Image (cartoon, coloured by chain):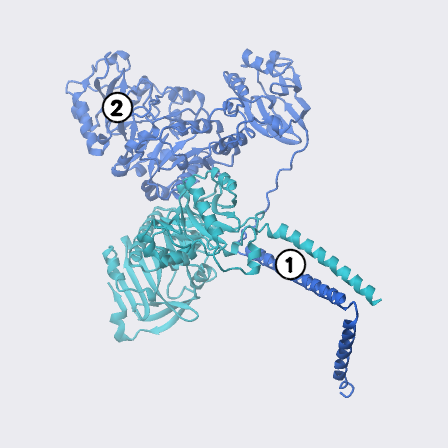
Chain colours: A cyan, B blue
Amino acid sequence: MQKINRNVVLALLSLTSLVFLLFQLCYYKFYLSQKNGAAFSKVRGSQSGQDSTRWHVVRKFLGLLSSHNIPVYLIDPLILGLVDKDIEQIRSSPDGPSPECKYFCAPRDFTTFALLDKTWKHEVGLFRTAEKMGFQWLKIINKDPRLDGMDDLSGMEIPLHYIFKLASHAIHLVVFYERSGNFLWHGPLRLKQHMDRKFVPFRKLHFGRYPGAYEKPELLLVSIDDLKVQIPKNPSSFLQEMSHSRFLECRYREARAFFQLYPDDASLDAVEFRKKAKSLLHLAALTLNNLGVKFWLSSGTCLGWYRQCNVIPHSKDVDLGIFIREYKADIIPAFQKAGLPLKHKFGKVEDSLELSFQGEDDVKLDIFFFYEEDDHIWNGGTQAKSGKKFKYLFPKFTLCWTEFVELKVHVPCETLQYVEANYGPEWKVPVKTWDWKSSPSNVQDNGVWPVDEWDDVIQIY
Amino acid sequence: MDEWKPNPAVKPHKKRSWYLAWKYKLMNQRALRKLCQTGAVLFLLVTVIVNIKLILDTRRAAYEEEEESAQDYDDEMLNVEVPRHPVNNKKVLDVEVYSSRSKVYVAVDGTTVLEDEAREQGRGIHVIVLNQATGHVMAKRVFDTYSPHEDEAMVLFLNMVARGRILIFTIKDEGSFHLKETAKNVLKSLGSQVASFLSWRDMWTFVGKKGGEVYGEKHAKSPALSTWGDPVLLKTEVHLTSVEDAECHWPDTELNRRRKRFCSKVEGYGSVCSCKDPTPIEFNPDPLKDNKVFDVPVAVIAGNRPNYLYRMLRSLLSAQGVNPQMITVFIDGYYEEPMDVVELFGLSGIQHTPISIKNARVSQHYKASLTATFNLFPDAKFAVVLEEDLDISVDFFSFLSQSIHLLEEDESLYCISAWNDQGYEHTAEDPSLLYRVETMPGLGWVLRKSLYKDELEPKWPTPEKLWDWDMWMRMPEQRKGRECIIPDISRSYHFGIVGLNMNGYFHEAYFKKHKFNTVPNVQLKNVESLRKDNYETEIHRLLGEAEVLDHSKNPCEDSFVPDTEGRVYVMFIRMEQEADFTTWTQLAKCLHIWDLDVRGNHKGLWRLFRKKNHFLVVGVPASPYSSKKPSSVTPIFMEPPAKEEGAVAVPAVAAAEQT
């Protein structure tokens, strides 16, 4: 009895084992081979050692593009990080053979390159050649944001990202477009429903979670790991830029809806004011950018951007925000040099600083300095005749790029909270009479300046 | 508690007995075999466990990946799958065709593909072309064969349709009055029994395959001149062929794939879809040396005239120095066929939801197109604006390349235009000559970005204002005294006959005889003298050398200008103040040039050619050049004829045309 039992058990187990073995084989064939062994190696946790696959894939990819005369440049943050450390050496010996594979051999799932849209012709031939070389490729297209602001135009969708995959390595090619603020823009990576979600682990990509805005980079042709490749001339500043590159598109659709409700003011005065506000903003941006001071659209100007993607014609001034830690004493002379005399200065660097410059024909440029606290950010206001101080509270925010009146400028990424803090939940309704001391929903009384400080904290020219 | 205590004691006992049993078995003869067996069992168990773990692990990894990639990277707007057209496996199409005095319709498989019951419209023979493999409508035309020449257009069209296509004909109202023998023979050759004796107010429907079988024909004779034939309804079945049979077998290239896509969708473009010898769709004209307009975006403004667009793009893409990447076609409305044409040539096209009506619609379309152009090409300082009904001269870009720096440097310039309003066959002569004029001709022109962005865009007429954009641009508030540069011989040709402000008569009278440059690489000769001050010097020099014509003769007569060549002549007409164009208009009329409003003037001076001589007309005393008039000469005055009816209305319509 016991013997028979044991034999039966043994036979059963052998059978199960055989089934499992077969199953395992099938599984390997259908699932893992499809993933080109990428997942397999990950499970095993083999992250060490050199990986020449990557180098070969990159070399093939660069060959493919140069055979089609398509200039790309390397924007892979990990490689650029390494390159940046050796930048002097790389610059000085652009052609030297490298003794070891230092950059392109670290095993990674991706290498990221950038392509300027206008430098290639969207030839289909590229993809045919790529296929012949064994690449699988994926194209991510979407609406053209440059037409988004336009009433009812529908163009062809434009390619935003390409992914070329060969063996276990993928090349992420980010397509950059020129935008009207004289900057480069790349789109977000969004998969459409029918797309292969497992083509690559999308989440690990360095670009594409958000759209991004960049300056046009100067490029440098270098030879690293025996591969000739273009890189941004200054990798560290590129990486710096990359970490703050998130771009917000204006809400054009909502703006159109707004104008349906409240038709735009097309009077000559409005046209004139917008023109002046635009040129004032351009001048202010130029001045502050030259000083390296980061600023953002604040108050009415920010509301105009958020609500109607334009300058609010009855707002009468241009408002900017600057963190007080960015304050520089040069700001005032720089504006004066640019032809914008100081109109008034309220507060002091330690408290409630606010500058106001006189633009052309009564258009004023107001600069508010923002003070960061643990759980909020605030800026101050001062009433000239009474010396009363006010405090405007905002929830904490970070800065994003956007395009506004043909300019690349910052706005708070959390724009809605910012605008709501300032203008309350009814911000969608235009208000023509606005009292900066009482209308904002985030205003607080903040005492009175001591009389002996008045000369310093209330300066009117 | 007490009961529980003995329990621990049991275990060692059991273990011990196990151990003893095992020890006993070991002493057994088959002990070794059993050991192996047990080992095998254990090993198998371990394998199974490891396997299960492996599977679970990979599963989880895969699942996590899926999760990861699913978040964030999903398209926010849940793209509703576009319902795809059901694959039509049906081999037979039911076709219904109706012909009557006031209504025609065609239904294919129950879907109405043509329905026209509008009054006073759609008279004549309606033709529909179906793809013989898919049953899709490839072309829809109506030829008003009650009127002259329309039958010729129909013959032309039918000849262009590829063999094997299914043709459907139906008459609305009247279609035989000007249906000539040739056309009737073509219809007969398609298999129609009735065509040859089709007569006044007959109703007729016909379905047949080009170069093949006839699927049905019905005819109702008109009993009397004053009445129409009874309505006829033809119901028939059409057998579809396979897709392979319906397509040509061109070599598989990128270009031919575009061609294939185009040719399986639309009809009526002739040799571009010819199987044997298709006309090229890529032109590769010679590049221009030192091309200054290579990076200038070109906006082609189009409506729903795909055949025009096709002709226009062909000429544009054949012009030397063209850069197809900079071309964007803006289509006013969601029309498919113009977009098909754009894609055939591999260009980019943008569709525009129509806003407003008539002229305002055109105007809004222009605004959207210009704004979009400067958005798409933020680096551009200029944009070339073209329309879909223009032929583009082979040296169009060469002309612009040589003159564009003026627009950049000379603030007193408003535009560069390829069109000379007064440049007719008999009044234009010199392809290398340029003028400055106070009027904006349009019809192929260059716009400066700063002008558009700073001045025009912010105050562009709003949709409710039914203004013509070009008339608006010509208003003094916009033009501010600035001028345009134009060539003597136009670099564009306006071939459109159908349009908002256009008809055949009008085209014949004002556009047909316009001169159009066909010489490549013309070297412009007086570019620098086109600058504001230089131009005055140039004019004074010209007037200085000009011979004064005999003012006693009739300026309308040919003999007014001597039979010479290459001379410069001047005549003086009366022009009391700046806006007095009475005599000029009369002169323009008798010279058969543009007389519907004043064009081509520069400070009261007009420049054109007569009998190959440069011919200057100066308005005295309004023009600053009046001082050149010898005191003995009396300026010619021509009186307008007594006002006829409608004489005022025509210019208003006509002036609007130059859009």
Residue type at mark 2 is Arg
The answer as to whether the residues below labels 2 and 1 share one chain is yes
> Does residue B153 appear in the picture of this structure?
yes
Q: Quadrant of the N terminus of chain A?
A: bottom right
- Residue A382 — which label? none
Residue picked out by circle 1: B55
Q: Position of residue B573 (x, y in %)?
A: 23, 21
- Earlier-in-chain disc, 2 versus 1: 1
Q: Quadrant of the C terminus of chain A?
A: bottom left
User: To which chain does the residue with label 2 belong?
Assistant: B
Direction bottom: furthest residue: B2
Q: Which residue is pictured at 66% across the width and 18% down the height?
A: B218
Task: Report crowding for label 2: few under 14, some 14 to 19, many 20 or more residues within 10 A (C-alpha).
Answer: many
Residue type at mark 1 is Ile
Which label sits in the foreground, 2 or 1? 1
B218 shown above or below A207: above
Task: Tell whether A149 sits left or right of B539.
Answer: right
Q: Position of residue A271 (x, y in %)?
A: 35, 47
Task: Report crowding for label 1: few under 14, some 14 to 19, many 20 or more residues within 10 A (C-alpha).
Answer: some
B51 shown above or below B397: below
Residue picked out by circle 2: B607
- Circle 1 — which element? helix
Q: Nearer the viewer, residue A87 or B67?
A: A87
Q: Position of residue A138 (x, y in %)?
A: 52, 46
Q: Nearer the viewer, residue B246 or A412?
A: B246
Measure the C-alpha gap from mark 2 to mark 1.
Answer: 88 Å
Task: Tell whether B431 sits left or right of B186.
Answer: left
- Is mark 2 in CB contact (under 8 Å) with mark 1? no
- Circle 2 — which element? strand
Q: Which residue is pictured at 22% across the width and 34% down the height?
A: B532
